[in-house]
Amino acid sequence: MKPNLSAKFGGGLTPRQFVESMSVNQQAFENGYERFEWTDEDDKAFFESLNYRDDLRALILAADWCGDVVRNVPAVFRILETAGIPAEVLVLEEHQDVMDHFLTMGGRAVPIVIIADTGGYVLGHWGPRPQHVQALMNEFKRENPDREAPGYEEKITAVRQAMGQAYGEGAECQAVIAKELRSLISGF
């Protein structure tokens, strides 16, 4: 059952406050934000059309130390800005109660973008990574369930490198995030 998060709205950080509070990765995050570009005009038009809706809100579970947050959230911020969807960031360490409703394969992974209505009812969520990148981690975890097994560290390092390559360079991954968020939001 999806939780009602109405009590969490108003208790998070604005996107700007989150960026200003970052103790690591701030420059890389800001670079990703500045480099964002729309590569699909249909996606851009879809998100612009959401400015006429006032029933959607977003909470983003994030942590500044997380590479996936640095790669994905700048694009998420830009997309939500284009859509006129108010967003707040919940820092993972301070909101583990929320995180526990949105586990990835039983674990805490960020970012998680939660879309809710004005009453705080969760409509859907996205994250922690684009589906094609997450698929690599899903396969790794299925094949390597024991963190104590010999060779685990070498294997996780290799899958993380493969995930970095799957993200690609430039606007490629930003466009994937936009399409995945569009697909999610189109459902409500």
Image (cartoon, helix red, strand yellow):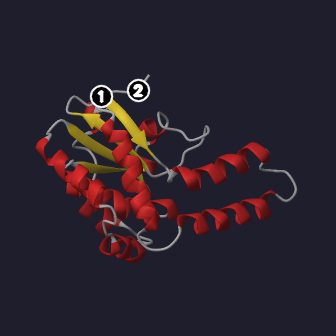
* Residue 188 vs residue 7, the one in the foreground: 188
Quarter holding residue 152: bottom right
* Residue 124 in the figure: left or right of residue 65: left
Measuring from the top left, give residue 59's x and y in whole percent: 32, 45
Measuring from the top left, give residue 57's x and y in whole percent: 24, 41
Measuring from the top left, give residue 34's x and y in whole percent: 30, 74
* Residue 7 in the figure: left or right of residue 151: left
Q: Residue at horizontal 48%, vertical 37%?
A: 102
Q: What is the three-letter code of the residue carrying label 1? A: Tyr
Measuring from the top left, give residue 91's x and y in whole percent: 39, 52
Compared with 98, 42 (above or below) is: below
Badge 2 is on which residue? 2
Q: What is the three-letter code of the residue carrying label 2? A: Lys
Q: Residue at horizontal 49%, vertical 73%?
A: 169
Compared with 61, 160 (above or below) is: below
- Gap between marks 2 and 1 measured at Cα: 8 Å
